[in-house]
Amino acid sequence: MSAALTTLVGIATALGASIVLVGWAAGSSGAASLVTGWRVMVPSTAFGFLCAGVALAIASSVGPERRAGGWIVRALALATLTLPAFTLLEYALDTRWFIEQWLIPAAQPPAADDYAGRMSAMTSISFVLLAVALAALTWPGRWGAGTVRHAAGTTLAMSWFGLLAVSIDAERLIDAPRFPGMAAPTIVLFAITCAGTLSCSSQTIARLRAANADIGLAPRLLIGAFVLPMALGWAQAWLAARLDPGLVTALVVGTFAAVFTVGLWRSAARMQRLRGQREALRADLEARVIERTKALADANAELQLSQGRLREADRRKDEFLATLAHELRNPLAPIRTSVELLKAADLVPEAKAQAHHVITRQMQHMVRLIDDLLDVSRIAADKLTLRRSPVDVRHVITQAVETARSALDRGGHAIRIEMPDLPMVVLGDETRLTQVVANLLLNACKYTPPGGNITVAATAREGTVEIRVRDTGIGIPASFLPRMFEKFAQVTPALDAEGGLGLGLALVRAIVELHHGTVAAHSDGPGQGSEFTIRLPLAEPRAVAGAEAPALQTASSALQTASSALQTAAPALQAARWRVLIADDNDDNANALAELLRYHGHIVETARDGEAAYAAAERHRPDVVMLDIGMPRLNGYEVCRRIREQPWGRGMRIVAQTGWGQAADRRRSEEAGFDSHLVKPIDPTQLERLFER
């Protein structure tokens, strides 16, 4: 029952009681009975319903939890209780105070009638219980809700029994002295008032909803329903000889109604507990289902993770192939340019010597790339063998520094070597160990800004030798450290550094582990430099050289075959003089291309990084700008965009010269503002067309 409907019930109860009181005041009792001749509702009963109806309306509309509403409800409950309490005293003391005349003086009962004209004992007890239920609405907590349930429920049951008595004893309705029950209007108003009172208790409604129609009746409740009436019938016969028959009947019926109501609520509570157990079992089943579902979800997540790893491996494979093409084209570009330069008949000896030097150095670089690929392939196939012998780590470090000397000088790095005076001998392959330290030094040069500091330190302790390579470079993000030694992994893309295949550190770890050692990387974060530590077991004094291994294959013959397959001499470039700016961080490529263009009469300037290229373009205002994409400080895309933003740069011919030649790379260079995209090594025919007017 909603709050609005409960309020209407309270108003209707008060209105019906008011009509009865007005009828009594007007000298007519017709409004107090449903049918003429039936028992009538006396004024005290009407007054009780008037107070109870108003209390119910206030409790449902204002709310008994509010302080003012609570006090009003308690006061009306007390008023509801007052007259029934006096009436019960009349019955208990076997006297008559004519309480009805206190309200309506005109309400005169027959002189010989002890029952007519006053509230019956059953009605009085019902009012007492109803008043208690109304007052309990203002009590907070479980006790208040329980009192409402039992008191209002008992009153509702008594009204049901009164209605039952009317139904089965209809011929005695007009025999007022012998019928101690309720008037029909009284039964109706009790029923609706008690129902409204129960609906005002939220805990009661929740419990009723929980104990719905399927609760059934407990077996002991069914037994009590038969045994209790017989016991009460015997008690009524015994008490009727000692007390007023009406009072005895009221007490018997009230007792039965109270026991029945308590049993009903206890049965509902028991069924609620059973329902709770059922819900617990259902929750346990749902938990098992959730557990199985989670297991399936975990398996699905693992499958998706595996698919992600496969996709990542495929992506890295594609990146590796693109990087491999880029890194192989980079040395081919200066080789091809130098070859074209050597075709000139009147080339000065110094230029020829420089061209030969460029070709040799770039071929060595290609050999290193191919060797790295072969080494990785051998390690993956478990075919790399070591030529073991006692090796002094100090000699290994010295050779590695010499191997990386050109990279150290090119970057202007300061190298510091810290080694003890005593030898530190390990049993290993000297060439491979030198390759390991050299890779770490080259890696430090690659990721350390010009003028940085690099330190190589070696110490022997507790049966191991430690080799540490520290730098003051760009550092390593913490998220990347776990993947440092994976194949094809690089801290930054090749676009922002000198590039590489991402195999150097993977080879370092593989070779060190073949020597039964470990390698670890550490960095405090970006911009904080990095440190690589190699630990190798010291050789025992009686150590001897290990098994022989075949010599490493080189790629010199393959490179010579590739060089012979290069295109033959291209037509000479036109003699028109152009102002040309060449920007490339590869010194050999920049110098060889500049020398070739100068030989054909062009005015050439060079730059080694992006910022220097932009400054040179602003200063010299060249006709043609040839930009490498992967330059330090600023990449070629950004340099092109900056030049195009200036009024003096909008008419320049800007050409991308790069090892990146896929469709996406060409589209990106076009979006950046390049006029042409040439892939290294540059075809002389393309170079000739570039300078055509």
Image (cartoon, grey):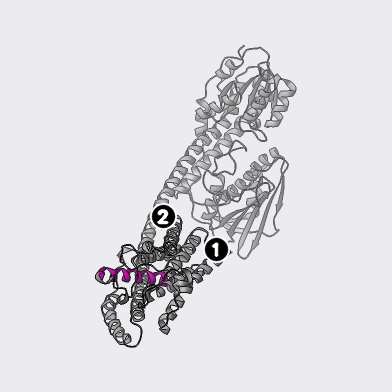
Label 1: which residue?
69
Left or right of residue 581, residue 95 in this image: left
Question: In the image shown, does 75 or 452 lie closer to the viewer?
Answer: 75
Image quarter where the N terminus lies is bottom left
Looking at the picture, which amino acid does disc 2 mark? Asp
Left or right of residue 232, residue 564 in this image: right
Q: Is residue 343 magenta?
A: no
Residue at horizontal 66%, vertical 12%? Answer: 576
Q: Which residues are magenta?
A: 148-170
Image quarter where the C terminus lies is top right
The location of residue 419, given as percent across then percent down, is: 69, 56
The location of residue 446, given as percent across then percent down, is: 64, 41
* Label 1 crowd (10 A; few <14 / some 14-19 / many >=20): some
Above or below 253: residue 610: above
Label 2: which residue?
298
Can residue 142 be seen from the camera position used here?
Answer: no
Q: Marks 1 and 2, Cα distance to the nearest angstrom?
A: 58 Å
Question: In the image shown, does 591 or 168 lie closer to the viewer?
Answer: 168
Locate residue 422: give its quadrant. Answer: bottom right
Above or below 335: residue 53: below
Residue at horizontal 52%, vertical 24%? Answer: 566
The location of residue 43, given as percent across then percent down, is: 43, 68
